[in-house]
């Protein structure tokens, strides 16, 4: 099937099998491999991207369902200033040591961006509940919560 | 520098998605492999009909075990022959005539694409003849059904540490208190967030291959590729690109790696495979799977006089790389932090028809610590004193270090009681006890439980001669190279292989600290055997106390040479030079100086070096430590238990750890946070559940309960610093400590919270159903359904 969608601000046209998952379209057809696949049951959230600004697990969306929509992946999150500047959420994860192996990180960051878009001033518990669909095996979440709170300019527990 | 909370050099590529994991690699012309796996735990393999699969679009080949038998010169490797008479079953990457666990590979589909390969798996028709599965560990040990006919028994080995049996018997005979406990460590699925992946690219000429793998051990994998596939070692390059966590599960040589090498060689094209998460549940090693019988003798005051531990360890169907040795890593630690004069440990390794077990974060030490710390709580109950007091009475005291343990180890350094004091302070122990009592007095149904454990572990694997005495096949040294390049930047080549631990940052700090330069001037190279040919890789919390020390020593060797060059050119005695901000200055004459960059350029140009000196400024050091290191600490957990539903919530947690000097406290804390959660997850949530047929019921993340942020509190961290005297950095290791401490801490809290109801034990994981039925049983109103 022919699809056209906006990915990181750029219109992309594709001819995909109806069964192809959005995450595989992004990774295999567009080479946007920053979006990781951590499971096959929509459990881990590593593949989280923004679809029209809201977080979705891109293993749970068919590429054809994204036809006509806007997708933002981790590669498109930072401002395209060309100077290596990071999005505030990426910067916060760096400054608060919110990542270790980094595999869950792109999905976690996009889920956190979406969370703050809905809830600009969350409590730590709001962040914990809001990120329930994104698993991390390295950090124990402590510093991920701090990262999101810092990005929200909220109160960070030491 | 050392001791600074330097932000990580690794982060930029990870937060932007620029890092490349194995599955991210673009490899033109690669064929995708998919594995046909046995759905039976134990079955003879009859005919395999691949015709339907081969007729599907994009499918190129289907290979069976017999098809591939000649592809390997040796079976899958086990590097740890723990006893002379250990029984090792033959283990080929693709089963030949019998499948011995659900998930064992019986055929390999090779296709043009990931989807085409996956589609064809179900079209391969395998004629299985199911056999009686051996699932239960104790039943397996009874040999009613023997899994590997050629071995004649399911018992692989029995390993014993009995330093003084007569003294031990006397201690138990004389004891005022003897507590006997039985503990079961359920099987755990490591669940690193990146599933495994492998890609093999054969060179079009010369027979070279490049093996990309999501592995913790590129160096060991290179040797084992030669040993199994017969590719000469100098023709093999192993690259571990970005690796998404390991926790021991990527400390292995896996069938899929050896299949990919064999097929890339046979077909002459690149081959690749990426594990699915559901596949990982059966195809990647499991952790724990241990039953412990623990006995502790004590005098009337609760002073421990002897420890006897007997362990059954579930090997699974085969011995993977270090499967039989895992419990040996805890074998010496069943007296923990306590001054115990007599000791006995024995472990029997037993085969079952389940996924092989192997190293999982902590590897043997969580098991030992759990047994000790739970039994000490049981002893406190028997003596009638607080769990804090029983520990204070038994700690090895600060003035006893280095401490020769009855378990035959020499603990390098320690000071245990301050970690307890600080942890109690952080958590507010006295207030919690008061609140616990208030709730009980008020008849409330949400109980508070407070659990404590003080642990010591041995890490930094090394020393080679000790590993030799345990029959481990390899050494424990680590290599590092430091080069000051002609333009003044520094390259460090590390033999350790990070996969989340932040070596690029920490090693840069070590070098920058010693050279007096900016850490941004230091680049750390690793995880590619073409760049870093010598190394022993990352596991067992060894990277810093072995590899980091090697980096420091290589830096010192470079600096020694730099001083010789500077003294020669500045025409002064070497002793007259001091290092100030990356510059070698004549003491008292700062104008007479050379920067390290100038020295490096002089070493490169070689126009004016001391007579006989080799050009260039680099050094390689291989460091083999004289002893393990012994990190320690005290953790305290607070749980809230709903008596009516059995729900346990982890509501507060304090951890005070001592890993000697800290290079980067931010990274240390991160390791502890993650470790705590993995340990707490064993206590409360995670278990690989098998049915009677030997089928894993919960291979996916839907029902294997890796915790999310919502189940967890923030953590209160403290630390003390007791440097290791055995290495020049005074460091220990912190990768596993959190996991080692947390499991007994949390379970002790659950038992403590229900102790007034008569509960003395709870099986892990302490799920609501188990907690509820345990309460009913303690009240005499129901059976325990464990």
Image (cartoon, rainbow, N blue to C red):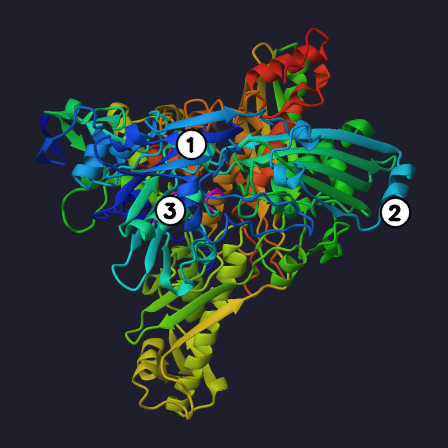
Q: Chain of mark 3?
A: B
Q: Earlier in the sequence, mark 2 or mark 3?
A: 2
What residue sits right under mark 1 in the picture? B37
Sooner in the amino-acid sequence: mark 1 or mark 3: 1
Circle 2 marks a residue in which chain?
A: B
Residue B407, x across and y down, in percent: 74, 49
Please report the bounds of the magenta region as a residue range.
B242-250
Element at label 2 = helix
Q: Is residue B398 above or below residue B707?
A: below
Say if labels 2 and 1 share a chain. Answer: yes
Prevailing secondary structure of the magenta residues: loop
Query: Is residue B79 found left or right of A158 in the rendered image?
Result: right
Residue at 24%, 31% (x, y): give it.
B55
Q: Which mark is residue A117?
A: none
Specify few, some or many for label 2: CA neighbours under 10 Å numbering under 14, 14-19, or 20 or more. Answer: some
Marks 1/3: CA–CA distance: 25 Å
| Residue B243 inside the magenta-drawn segment | yes
Mark sitting earlier along the chain (2/1): 1
Secondary-structure class at tag 3? loop
Residue B257 rendering spot, x and y as whole percentages: 40, 47
């Amino acid at each position: 099937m022919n699809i056209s969608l906006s990915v990181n601000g750029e219109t992309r046209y594709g001819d995909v099998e109806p069964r192809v998952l959005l995450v595989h379209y992004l990774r295999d057809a567009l080479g946007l491999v920053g979006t990781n696949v951590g499971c096959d049951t929509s459990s881990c959230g590593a593949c989280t991207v923004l679809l029209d600004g809201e977080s979705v697990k891109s293993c749970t969306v068919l590429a054809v369902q994204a036809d006509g929509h806007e997708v933002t992946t981790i590669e498109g999150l930072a401002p395209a200033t060309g100077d290596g500047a990071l999005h505030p959420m990426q910067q916060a994860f760096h400054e608060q040591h919110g990542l270790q192996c980094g595999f869950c990180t792109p999905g976690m960051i996009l889920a956190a961006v979406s969370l703050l878009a809905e809830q600009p001033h969350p409590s730590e518990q709001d962040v914990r509940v809001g990120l329930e669909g994104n698993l991390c095996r390295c950090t124990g979440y402590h510093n991920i919560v701090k990262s999101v709170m810092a990005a929200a300019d909220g109160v960070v527990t030491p | 520098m050392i001791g600074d909370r330097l932000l990580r050099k690794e982060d930029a590529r990870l937060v932007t998605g620029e890092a490349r994991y194995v599955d991210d690699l673009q490899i033109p012309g690669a064929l995708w492999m998919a594995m046909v796996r046995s759905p039976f735990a134990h079955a003879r393999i009859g005919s395999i009909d691949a015709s339907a699969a081969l007729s599907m679009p994009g499918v190129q080949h289907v290979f069976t075990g017999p098809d591939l038998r000649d592809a390997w010169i040796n079976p899958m490797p086990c590097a740890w022959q723990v006893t002379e008479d250990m029984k090792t079953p033959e283990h080929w990457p693709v089963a030949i005539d019998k499948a011995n666990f659900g998930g064992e590979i019986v055929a390999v589909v090779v296709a043009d694409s990931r989807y085409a390969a996956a589609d064809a798996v179900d079209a391969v028709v395998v004629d299985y003849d199911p056999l009686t599965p051996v699932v239960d560990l104790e039943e397996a040990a009874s040999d009613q059904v023997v899994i590997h006919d050629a071995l004649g028994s399911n018992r692989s080995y029995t390993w014993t540490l009995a330093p003084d049996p007569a003294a031990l018997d006397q201690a138990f005979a004389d004891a005022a208190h003897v507590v006997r406990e039985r503990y079961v460590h359920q099987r755990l699925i490591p669940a690193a967030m990146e599933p495994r992946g492998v890609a093999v690219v054969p060179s079009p000429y010369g027979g070279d291959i490049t093996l990309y793998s999501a592995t913790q051990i590129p160096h060991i994998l290179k040797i084992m590729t030669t040993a199994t596939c017969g590719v000469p070692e100098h023709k093999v390059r192993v690259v571990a690109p970005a690796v998404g966590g390991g926790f021991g599960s990527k400390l292995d040589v896996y069938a899929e790696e050896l299949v990919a090498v064999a097929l890339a060689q046979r077909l002459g094209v690149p081959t690749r495979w990426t594990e699915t998460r559901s596949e990982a549940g059966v195809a990647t090693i499991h952790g724990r799977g241990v039953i412990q019988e623990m006995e502790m003798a004590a005098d009337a005051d609760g002073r421990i006089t002897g420890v006897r531990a007997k362990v059954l360890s579930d090997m699974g169907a085969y011995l993977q790389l270090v499967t039989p040795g895992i419990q040996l890593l805890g074998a010496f630690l069943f007296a923990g932090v306590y001054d115990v004069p007599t000791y006995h440990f024995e472990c029997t390794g037993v085969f079952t028809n389940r996924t092989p077990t192997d190293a999982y974060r902590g590897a043997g030490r969580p098991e030992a610590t759990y047994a000790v710390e739970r039994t000490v709580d049981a002893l406190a109950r028997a003596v009638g004193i607080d769990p804090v007091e029983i520990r204070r009475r038994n700690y090895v005291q600060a003035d006893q270090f280095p401490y020769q343990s009855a378990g035959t180890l020499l603990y390098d350094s320690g000071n245990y009681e301050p970690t307890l004091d600080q942890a109690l302070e952080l958590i507010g122990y006295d207030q919690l006890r008061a609140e616990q009592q208030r709730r009980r007095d008020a008849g409330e149904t949400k109980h508070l439980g407070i659990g404590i454990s003080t642990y010591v572990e041995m890490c930094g694997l090394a020393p080679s001669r000790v590993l030799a005495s345990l029959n481990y096949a390899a050494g424990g040294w680590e290599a590092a190279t430091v080069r000051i390049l002609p333009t003044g930047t520094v390259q460090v080549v590390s033999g350790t292989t990070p996969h989340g631990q932040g070596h690029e940052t920490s090693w840069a700090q070590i070098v920058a600290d010693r050279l007096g330069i900016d850490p941004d001037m230091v680049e750390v190279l690793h995880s590619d055997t073409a760049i870093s040919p010598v190394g022993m890789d990352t596991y067992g919390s060894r990277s810093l106390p072995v590899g980091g020390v090697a980096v420091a020593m290589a830096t010192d060797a470079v600096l020694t040479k730099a001083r010789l060059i500077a003294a020669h050119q500045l025409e002064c005695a070497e002793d007259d030079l001091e290092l100030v901000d990356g510059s070698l200055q004549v003491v008292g004459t700062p104008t007479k100086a050379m920067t390290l960059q100038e020295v490096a350029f002089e070493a490169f140009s070689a126009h004016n070096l001391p007579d006989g000196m080799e050009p260039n400024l680099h050094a390689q050091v291989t460091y083999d430590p004289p002893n393990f290191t012994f990190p320690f600490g005290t953790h305290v957990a607070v749980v809230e238990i709903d008596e009516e539903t059995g729900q346990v919530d982890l509501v507060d947690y304090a951890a005070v750890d001592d890993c000697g000097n800290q290079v980067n406290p931010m990274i240390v804390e991160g390791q502890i946070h993650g470790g705590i959660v993995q340990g707490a997850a064993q206590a409360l949530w995670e278990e690989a559940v098998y049915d009677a047929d030997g089928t894993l019921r919960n291979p996916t993340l839907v029902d294997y309960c890796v915790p999310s942020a919502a189940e967890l509190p923030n953590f209160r961290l403290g630390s003390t610093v007791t440097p290791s005297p055995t290495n020049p950095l005074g460091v220990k290791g912190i990768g596993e400590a959190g996991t080692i401490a947390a499991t007994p801490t949390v379970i002790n809290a659950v038992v403590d919270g229900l102790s007034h109801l008569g509960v003395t034990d709870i099986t892990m994981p302490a799920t609501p159903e188990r907690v509820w039925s345990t309460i009913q049983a303690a009240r005499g109103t129901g059976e325990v359904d464990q």
